[in-house]
Amino acid sequence: MAEEKIEIAARMRVLREIEGISAEALADELGFDTPEYKKWESGEAEISVGALVEIANHFGVDLTELVMGKPSRLRTFCLTRAAQGTEVIRRPMYTHWNLAHNFHHKKGEPFLVEAAADTEQKPLSFNTHPGQEFDYVLEGRLLISVGGHEMELGPGDSIYYDSGEPHGMKALGGQRARFLAMVL
């Protein structure tokens, strides 16, 4: 994961340099904390999937290209078979599988997300990113906090929210929670 983080950071830096914009100006334009953005770009800190989506959108590249270094190619449809999504590990508490990694110019990023069973005893880790997000719980119980409002969701429950609000989630009951997340 450390090598992947450094490679993503290098691609971010190259895209920014090609555009001829400083790290400070880009962070300000995208609404990121400048010191945190600099840590992302140097590979010192983990970057959330939501922030990666925003950075990819800013530079006009697909998330796949930013994360994997390969361009997406499919334009009509992208079929992802069970257990075949492209794994994207960004934070230790969550594993994301991109369910449309190879579709060119997506309007949103669909993920299957798993919150680890051991997250219940850990404090919520908050994230913000521009746009909106839709989460649909498939299994397990999930505590989610959005803008200071905590809710418990179970299978079949969903939430749609402004992802610019601080949000975080964790599995409850000592079991993993799996949910579909659509980042728009």
Image: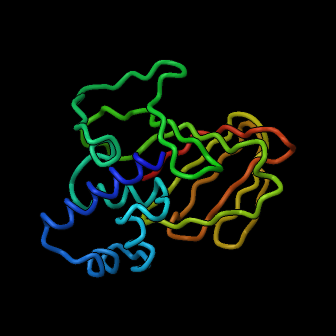
Q: Residue at x 57, y 52 (%)?
A: 91
Say above or below: 70 vs 120.
above
Say above or below: 15 vs 31.
above
Residue 108: x %, y % from top left: 39, 46
Say above or below: 119 vs 26.
above
Determine which quarter of the picture holds residue 167.
Answer: bottom right
Residue 184: x %, y % from top left: 42, 53
In this image, 163 relative to 77: left or right? right
Residue 131: x %, y % from top left: 43, 62
In this image, 1 relative to 150: left or right? left
In this image, 65 relative to 5: left or right? left
Q: Residue at x 39, y 21 (%)?
A: 79
Q: Residue at x 51, y 50 (%)?
A: 90
Relative to the observer, which residue lies in front, 176 or 141? 176
Residue 97: x %, y % from top left: 50, 36
Relative to the observer, which residue lies in front, 8 or 170? 8
